[in-house]
Amino acid sequence: MGMVFLIGLGGFAGAVARYVVDRQVTASVAGVMPWGTLLVNVSGSFLVGLAFALLSERAALPAELRGPLMIGFIGSYTTFSTLVLESWLMLEAGAWLAASANLVGSVIVGTGALVAGLAMGRAL
């Protein structure tokens, strides 16, 4: 099987996992706070850190798993985990300003894109 197929398979599994986790948590917890999304993002951050350490730093898993696991599964499970990993790696490298700009900028730009998308969708 080609790498693209394996990444796609991981993406399918990650998307389904996100849906199942989010629905289960949302059905179990009342309120306005999106607890399902929070759980997915936090657990995805944990998984990407674990996968990065096991695949890149310790070579405890085959390198061929990196694409299907990190890009496919975790990438479709949550993209927040990638933001956190990249920011953490910047912090570890001493790039505090870049890491801060990445985190704050992502939230601000993401919110701006959300508002723009809402405005466009409501205008159509």
Image (cartoon, rainbow, N blue to C red):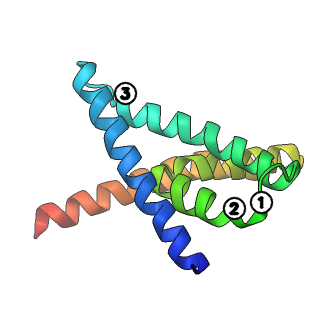
Q: Amino acid at mark 3?
A: Trp
Residue 52 or residue 8, whichever sits in front: 8
Residue 104 or residue 8, whichever sits in front: 8
Residue 19 or residue 5, whichever sits in front: 5
Q: CA distance from mark 3 to mark 1?
A: 33 Å
Most extreme residue toward the bottom is: 2
Q: Residue beneath label 3, please?
A: 35
Quarter of the image where the C terminus is located? bottom left
Tell which circle, 3 or 2, labels the residue nearer the N-terminal end: 3
Q: Residue at x 52, y 56 (%)?
A: 73
The spot of residue 83 in percent (x, y) is: 61, 51
Q: Is residue 19 left or right of residue 44?
A: left
Is residue 100 visible in the rendered image? The answer is no
The spot of residue 64 in percent (x, y) is: 72, 67
Q: Residue beneath label 1, please?
A: 62
Which disc is residue 66 wearing? 2
Up-down: is 65 above or below 97?
A: below
Category of crowding for the residue at label 1, using alpha-carbon neighbours closer than 10 angstroms: few (below 14), some (14–19), many (at least 20): few
Q: Quadrant of residue 26?
A: top left
Q: Is residue 40 left or right of residue 86?
A: left
Q: Residue at x 54, y 69 (%)?
A: 7
Up-down: is 6 above or below 85?
A: below
Q: Amino acid at mark 1?
A: Pro
Q: Amino acid at mark 2?
A: Arg
Q: Is residue 104 left or right of residue 63?
A: left
Which is more foreground, mark 3 or mark 2? 2
Tell which circle, 3 or 1, labels the residue nearer the N-terminal end: 3
Q: Residue at x 55, y 42 (%)?
A: 44
Q: Are marks 3 and 2 in contact (CB under 8 Å)?
A: no
Category of crowding for the residue at label 2, using alpha-carbon neighbours closer than 10 angstroms: few (below 14), some (14–19), many (at least 20): some
Up-down: is 18 above or below 42?
A: below
